[in-house]
Image (cartoon, rainbow, N blue to C red):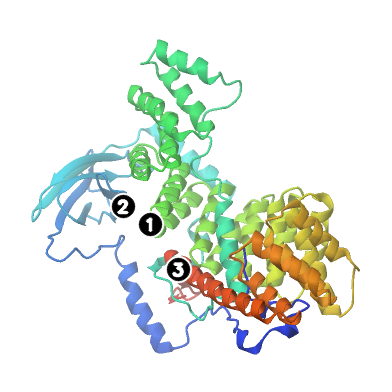
Amino acid sequence: MGRDSPSERNGPTAEMNQPDRVRSSATFHHGFCSPLFIAALVTWMSLFVAPSFAQNASPQGQLRISIAGTVRDSGSKPVAGARVLLKRQGEAKTLESRTNADGAFTFSAPGAGSYTVLVQKTDEYKGVSEVITVSTGKTKRVELVVEDLSAGEKASTGASVNSNAAQGTMEFEDKPDFTVAGVSDWSDLGLHGSDIKVRTSEELAKDTAALKSGGASEGKASAEASPSEGELKVAVARAPENFEANYNLGAFYLRSQKYAQAIPPLEAASRIDPRNPVSAYDLGLAYEGNGDLAKAHDQIVKMLSSVNTADLHRMLGDVDERTGDSLGAVGEYETAVRMDPNEENYFAWGAELLLHRAAGPAAEVFTKGSSTHPDSARMLAGLGAALFATGSYEEAAQKLCAASDLKPADPGPYIFLGEMETATPSPLPCGDARLARFAREQPENALANYYYAMALLKQERRSGSLVSPNQPEELLEKAVSIDPKLGKAFVELGNVYIAREEVGKAIDAYQKAVEASPELSEAHYRLGLAYKRAGKDAEAQEEFQTYEKDEKAETAADEQQRREVRQFLIVLRTPSDTSAPH
């Protein structure tokens, strides 16, 4: 994580870097330069904000189909503001609309086929869905009737809402200071592939997203006193139409993350008792875990028609992200937070924003989530990653230090902090002490030794004197003895030897770095410099050529990965209630 080019390192041999190999660092840009460009962007973004869903242009020569309908209650009164979803069977993408004052809605469908039209449940009405078949060139009309919730159901819903408010959910007056208005393909905005801070920020965003527990976890069933697999299979064989027998077997496999094996018994359980919310939820988890994303999407949308929960919206967000619908995902995560501001929902929302380069909004969400859940170490870690992406390096380090204090045995916050420490030229506040604790309390962790060694080497470069004689070398040697594949530690060990004019030992360390991590371009470059110092010009030239080839490949891979992650377009709220793009 956080690869860097030699010219961006402040190691002992920085003075040896050849001038033609120096590459300019880039900085993050948080605004747009031209007022004319801003005006044009606002006009363009209005195309995203006006409709409630994207109406993609149809392929040339293909006629789109109009689906129009109304939503009324049981007394034939129009229902305004109802959320209506349209999904073509066999596809994951869902279109969304809202009914107007007359209860009317319209969709432009991409082609003939079978569609599910679904009205989501609200505090006043039950959800309803209907499957329709449409033909090319025709307008299909749909009349949907929603039933009133009983007084008991309304009271229960109201109690849930009040409970959420007491827990700190974002009410109207507590809306975030941003809106995700759309997505765009990546544009560099001044970023450069060789900038170690850019690369570190991107890797931290990915690692933050990986901290999400994910939808496909253990499901709803308890793992306590669970029977064996054999006993559960015997129970199903004896009573194949028994709900409990099928569900228990499916839940067993789900807890074991054997998703493909979990699906058949969970499908059987849902067929036997289609109204059971626990088995239906776990079936959605099994589909998602097995990669059956279209089925997972269908299952979640089906459940939302009868029960509207934050867990389902978060699970739908997970599925949307995996199918490439990042705009749908961030909307589902925000909805989950508004319904239930628990730690998992806040973290999923913030991580999604950070992953799609909305660092400022991500920091806002993580800040709110951290204040609501002050004991969450991963919330502080996510906040630190978001602050680092905005250029607030010292504040970012302080959040990671706080996260490591909350969970001293968790290596995650230390690793985040270590990456930040190696990516910035100046020491970060509290970083040295926490990384020292990491190495002291987890001495058999290769990264603990590596990051603490890097912090000590940075101190020595800043002070111009040896802070802890031989300690960085000992830590690096221990790191590579624990993990012989840790190529970057071999590189730093070689740098230590070069600084002491021990060229032979440096060459040996760099060679081991190349063996451990052949794709690490800096290892080839440093080895080339060491060969040159030893008078081995032919070997040096070969390593320089390899470095140039690998560096180009690394940069191209970075650029490709950035293009694959779509970037959120953010509209900021202002005190005057006007909006500005960001």
| Residue at which label 3 appears | 560
Question: Is 481 displayed left or right of 223 in the figure?
Answer: right
Q: What whole-number distance in Å separates the C-alpha atoms at marks 3 and 1?
A: 19 Å
Mark earlier in primary sequence (1, 2): 2
Asked if 364 appears above or below 68 in the picture, the reply is: below
Q: Nearest the camera: 221 or 161?
A: 221
Residue lying farthest left? 137
Rendering coords of residue 336 (x, y %): 47, 49
At horizontal 71% and vertical 60% (from top left) the residue drawn is 400
Q: What whole-number distance in Å separates the C-alpha atoms at marks 1 and 2?
A: 8 Å
Q: Quadrant of the N terminus?
A: bottom right
**Residue mark closest to the camera, 3 vs 1:** 3
The mark found on residue 107 in the picture is none
Tags 2 and 3 in contact by the CB under 8 Å rule? no
Question: Is 321 displayed left or right of 350 in the figure?
Answer: left
Tags 1 and 2 in contact by the CB under 8 Å rule? yes
At horizontal 66% and vertical 70% (from top left) the residue drawn is 523
Would you identify the image quadrant in which residue 131 lies? top left
Q: Label 3: state its secondary structure.
A: helix
Residue type beneath disc 1: Asp
Mark earlier in primary sequence (3, 1): 1
For label 1, count other residues whose C-alpha is less than 10 Å away and answer few (under 14), some (14-19) or many (20+): some
At horizontal 79% and vertical 49% (from top left) the residue drawn is 444
Q: Label 1: state its secondary structure.
A: loop
Mark earlier in primary sequence (2, 3): 2
| Residue at which label 2 appears | 93
Q: What whole-number distance in Å separates the C-alpha atoms at marks 2 and 3?
A: 24 Å
Residue type beneath disc 2: Lys
